[in-house]
Amino acid sequence: MKLVTVEDLKDGNIIANDVLLEDYTVVLAKGTVIKAPYIDKLRELDIFTVYIEDEQELTAKPEEPKPEPPKSPKAEAPKDPKPEPSKAPAPKKPVAPVSPKPEANKQSKIPMEKVTILRDEVEEQVKNKIKDILELHVYQQTEGLQQIAETAQNIMSDILEEDEVVEKVYDVRERSADIYEHSLQVCTIATLIGLKLGLTKKQVYDISVASLIHDLGLRYLVVRYEDQDINLLPAKDQEEYKKHPIYAYTAIKNESWLSENAKEIVLNHHEKKDKSGYPLGNDLVSRMTQIVGVCDEFDELICGIGKARVRVHEAINNIRNYSGIWYDSDIVSAFLQLIAVYPFGSKVRTNRGELGIVMRQNPHFPERPVIRVVEDKYGQAIHTELIIDLIKETTVVIQEVVK
């Protein structure tokens, strides 16, 4: 292990110690393989030095066992048995690594892991592609918009490459109100829900492609909607904002490459089963539209599109509260099984008063992650690695997320 400056980092270097901010947020986990975007992010965060694995040490380790096989053909055979008994009094060795240390070693082998729906490099490429396509689009001039269909197909293919894709719990973080990133996020989560509920490939594809253009109408608005609760805007602005699904539908209704199901999703993604939605306030909301609606509601809350931004666990609670009211309960249940309540890197406080960092998720248990304790209940920093797996430590619960 050696300390290097960020400027000296190269693609392929391996992080030897977790890279943390002052508030203990994990930027890069131990074992991460460095790529160019990571170096840029470290510079952006004013992190100047990191520990990396020493290449010489890594190459030296495999060579160490080699001297042992060539040991002792026959000449040294007689000498071996005698040292063995003399080493018999070496039962002191098990005594040396006394009680807590073996446990600590076992715990330290638990890797930190962030689980994303798309690989980072794929997500960035797809987001830029969506932006390029939608920014070139002008109202009712839809040449080029059909490329969205190919993009949706590529997203589905990338998701389906992963093993047991619908059995995982995914980390989704709060972020800024970017409609292109929002469209991609809604698409990926809705695609997962469709797969988890056993929809046909054609239905999942329609959900994916509709998700990518569901907020096309926002591009025609002059009303400011970023980090704004639209219900607090003047009535005139509220009315204008709530027309964006109609604007989007009008722009794409004559497109032959889009199915009627996809068009219906674009028009009705803000409608609710209890008639409290918009733009028409009807309750005839298909299951495919509800799937996109759940994902849209969640992501709007965590990125602040037409809503005041909230934390992930608050957005999830909001979705849970409207299960069976706004959306079918099995759709909400599928959503809740896929999205981590406490994303990777979140700072949380337990019922015992400890401060911890979420280091990985437990599949099938989105509310019970693995955390690393960084402060005890008295606020004292813990320098040794103390890991709590909330699946195993059933008496420990997360009481709050610390900002």
Image: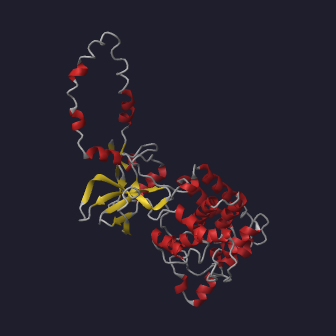
Q: Residue at x 33, y 14 (%)?
A: 72
User: In this image, 83 relative to 301: left or right?
Assistant: left
Examine the image and state in which quarter residue 266 appears: bottom right
Q: Position of residue 63 (x, y in %)?
A: 38, 27
Q: Position of residue 75 (x, y in %)?
A: 31, 9
Q: Nearer the viewer, residue 176 or 284?
A: 284
Q: Position of residue 139 (x, y in %)?
A: 71, 74
Q: Is residue 281 visible?
A: yes
Examine the image and state in which quarter residue 357 appears: bottom left
- Looking at this view, name the residue that lies furthest to the top: 75
- Looking at this view, name the residue that lies furthest to the bottom: 235
User: In this image, 70 relative to 327: left or right?
Assistant: left
User: In this image, 325 relative to 283: left or right?
Assistant: left
Count of numbered marks: 0
The answer to whether residue 397 is above or below residue 19 is below
Q: Residue at x 35, y 35 (%)?
A: 57
Q: Is residue 295 visible?
A: no
Q: Which color scheme did the rendering employ for the protein?
A: secondary structure
Q: Quadrant of the N terminus?
A: top left
Q: Residue at x 69, y 68 (%)?
A: 137
